[in-house]
Structure formats: structure tokens, C-alpha cells
Image (tube, helix red, strand yellow):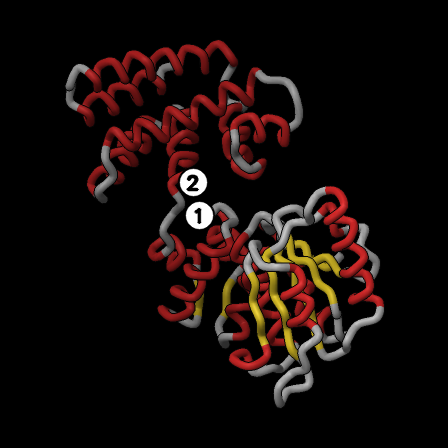
Amino acid sequence: MIKFISLKEKLKTGFFPLLVVYGNDLWLKEKAIENIVSSLNITVDFNVSKFNEAADVDAVFLACSTLPFIDSHRAVIVDMNMPQGKKGQELKKRLEKFALHPQQSCCLVINTDNPKPFESVKGVEMVDCTKLDTENIIKWITSYVRINKGTVDRLAAQTIAEYCLNDMARVSNEVEKLVGYSSEVTLENVRLLVHKDMEYVVFDLGKAIAGKNVERSLSMISSLIEKGEEPRALFGVLYNFYRRMYYVKTAEGTTESKANLLQVKPFALKYVTEVAQNYKPMQLKKALELFLEADEKIKLFFNDRETLEFLVLQLLQL
């Protein structure tokens, strides 16, 4: 199995006829496929064939058997999940035959949502594009900035990752913007230019409320509204944050099981869990009751902003 972070170096060691790209970060998957194709030094217009999940398997293998034009290699990229039953077994045999006795000019890349059935295919190389942790994102940011002849310190890189909730699509966009602004990526520039993910903003607000910081809490609400955020929308995301805190605090099970029930990724509960440590279950239950009262006021056409600010003041008193 090859981790995304080490894929480029691994591709330099030799040719891989069959690669299966999987994981929950779409940006990483797209970048992994891009890196694989780039490592083959081929003319994309002539020697790359792409198939979606509805494609006929025979057509895919026919493309694999086609000789490259001008270049020494070609790539076949297909979105594919392993079919069930007999069809799945037949496909496994065909993939093994291709991987173990490859036509050395062709690299078959399978992009899948379900990697498990492919793991038992002999000769396959699995490419893990699971969401990167903060440490690996810091390494990626540092490497990207250096390649672009810039500098970045660890705290600035860590803050970028936090503001973007480790979402590599956003991280890459924000880092590109920062490098374009200045070759020196500083914490000051990160705070000035990087747009915080709303979930991070709510975490920051929740942390201020839990810390009984009245001035910062109200100032954040005021700043968000002045930047165009609707009070009702802020009410919704803040309620969702407190609802998750109550569930994390009271439910049994692992972080993964709680994330599955809440239909979020485990990483999304990191900040929720951190703030929830400041509360007892009864306090969080009371907080949800306060949200219900505020919701009734909003539905009765009370002033949205005043209702939200009064709610925050009530939460500060818990």
C-alpha cells in the first residue's frame, strides 16, 4: 500500500501496471492520478483513455491492450467498484492476469470508492488517499512553498490546516494564494488572507463561549454578520455544533461510530470533543433547550440578530 504523501517517490522506483486509488479526499485522488500519469511521461491527448463506472469491462481491457502512440507508455483510467458474485470473481481473474503478466506499456489505474474487494487481487498496488492528518498537511505545505522558492514556519502551516479543516482542496487553493501574495508565508498573512471554514469559525465561537469570554463571543457574532453571514444561518450552525457536543458527551462508542451516526467524518468531531470537555451533560441539555426557545422566537418574527446575541449571552451563563 502506498500513502499519497509518498506516491511521487514510489513512482520513481519502477513501473506499476495496476494501481487502485481510493480514499475520502477527492482532491488527493485526483492529484494521485495526475501524478501517476505524469510519471509515465506520456502525451495525454494520445495515450490516456478514461472510462466512467458505466463502461463495459471488455472495452477497458481492449484499451489496455492497445499500443501507445509515439510514447513508450499509455494509461487507462477507470472509475470502478468491484461487482458482486460471479462477475466480481471474473473481473478479479482478469485484473490478476493483467497485473502479473502485464503488457509493460500500459498502466491501468482504477479509481474506486470501495477498495476492500481489490486488496485480494494479486499484483495490485493500493494508493491510499484518505484525508491527511495535520502533520502530513504541514509537510505538504512546507514542500509546496519551498518548491515555489518561499518560506513558511510550522505554526503558519498548522494554522492553514486548521482553518481549512484539513481539506486538501482548500489547503492547496489557500497556499497558492499565499505564495502569490508573498514568498514569505507568515502567520500574520495566514490570519489576514486565509478564509476560515465555517465549521472552524463555529468551533472558535464555541470555544469563546465555553471559556466565558463575553467580549470575544459577541465581537465574533458582530464581525460575522457584518461580513454578510445571516443570523439565522449562524443560529443553525451553532445549534448543530451544540447538538454534536451533547451527543459526543452522552453517547457510548468510538469516535468512528459516533461520526457514522451523525453522518460526519471522524475528523469533524475533533473540535466538538475539545469544546465539549468544558461542559457537563446537563449543561449541554440546557443549552439545547435554550436553542429551542430561541428558535420559537425566530419563527414568531423576533429580531434575528437580537435573538442570536441574547442566546449567546444565555450560553455564556451555563
| Placement of the C terminus among the 4 image quadrants | top left
Label 1 belongs to which residue?
A: 163
**Percent x, y of residue 36:** 64, 70
Q: Nearer the viewer, residue 57 or 129?
A: 57
Residue 265 lies, with reference to residue 179, above or below; the image says above
Mark 1: amino acid: Tyr
Mark 2: amino acid: Tyr
**Quarter residue 108 falls in:** bottom right
Left or right, 246 with reference to 306: right
Q: Kindly identify the residue that appears in the image at 43 percent across and 72 percent down.
A: 183
Residue 219 at least partly seen: yes
Tag count: 2
> Which label sits on residue 102?
none
Query: Tag 1: Cα neighbours inside 10 Å, few (<14), some, or many (≥20)?
Result: many
Mark 1 and mark 2 in contact? Answer it, CB < 8 Å. yes
Query: Tag 2: Cα neighbours inside 10 Å, few (<14), some, or many (≥20)?
Result: some
Residue 138 at least partly seen: no
**Quarter residue 173 falls in:** bottom left
Q: Nearer the viewer, residue 33 or 138?
A: 33
Q: CA distance from mark 1 to mark 2?
A: 6 Å
SS label for mark 1: helix
Label 2 belongs to which residue?
A: 200
SS label for mark 2: helix
Left or right, 59 with reference to 193: right
Which callout, 1 or 2, points at the residue further toward the start of the chain?
1
**Percent x, y of residue 92:** 78, 54
Residue 230 lies, with reference to residue 214, above or below; the image says below
**Percent x, y of residue 256:** 63, 31
